[in-house]
Image (cartoon, grey):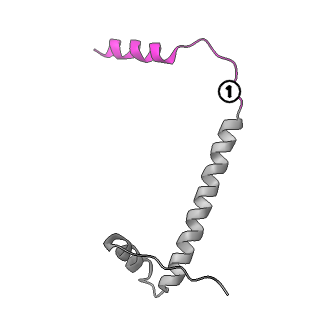
Amino acid sequence: MADTITIRTDAETEHALDVLTHDGSSRSAVIRQAVLEAALRRERATAMRRAVLRMPIGEPDGVDVGAELSRDRDRER
C-alpha cells in the first residue's frame, strides 16, 4: 500500500486543483500526476544541462563578443 501525503493548500493551489479536477478527476489522481510530471521535467532539465556541459566548446575564434556588441551599440547611436 502506498504512503499517504498531506499537503496544505492556499488559494492559488485550490484554484489549480479546481482546474485540474474540472473533468471529474480526483484530487488524489491529479496531484499524483502533477508530481510525476514535475519529476520528469526536472530529470529532463538535468539531462539537458549535463549534455550541454559535455559538449565540446571548440577552439576560440578570436572574437571578443563584448567588444563587438559595444561597437554595434556605438553605431546605433
Q: Residue furthest left?
A: 77
* Neighbours of disc 1 within 10 Å: few (<14), some (14-19), many (20+): few
Q: Residue at x 31, y 16 (%)?
A: 76
- Image height check: is 1 above or below 39? below
Residue type highlighted by circle 1:
Ile
The verdict on residue 76 being magenta is yes
Going by the image, does 64 lie left or right of 12? right
Going by the image, does 30 lie left or right of 18? right
Going by the image, does 16 lie left or right of 45? left
Considering the image in quadrants, where does the C terminus appear? Answer: top left
The verdict on residue 68 being magenta is yes
Name the quadrant containing residue 38: bottom right
Q: Position of residue 23 (x, y in %)?
A: 45, 84
Residue marked by disc 1: 57
Start and end of the magenta stretch? 56-77
SS class, disc 1:
loop
Q: Position of residue 47 (x, y in %)?
A: 67, 49
Q: Position of residue 11 (x, y in %)?
A: 31, 73
Q: Position of residue 27 (x, y in %)?
A: 47, 83
Q: How many marks?
A: 1
- Image height check: is 56 above or below 26? above
Q: For this rendering, which residue is in front, 1 or 49? A: 1
Q: Residue at x 56, y 13 (%)?
A: 63
Q: Residue at x 43, y 18 (%)?
A: 69
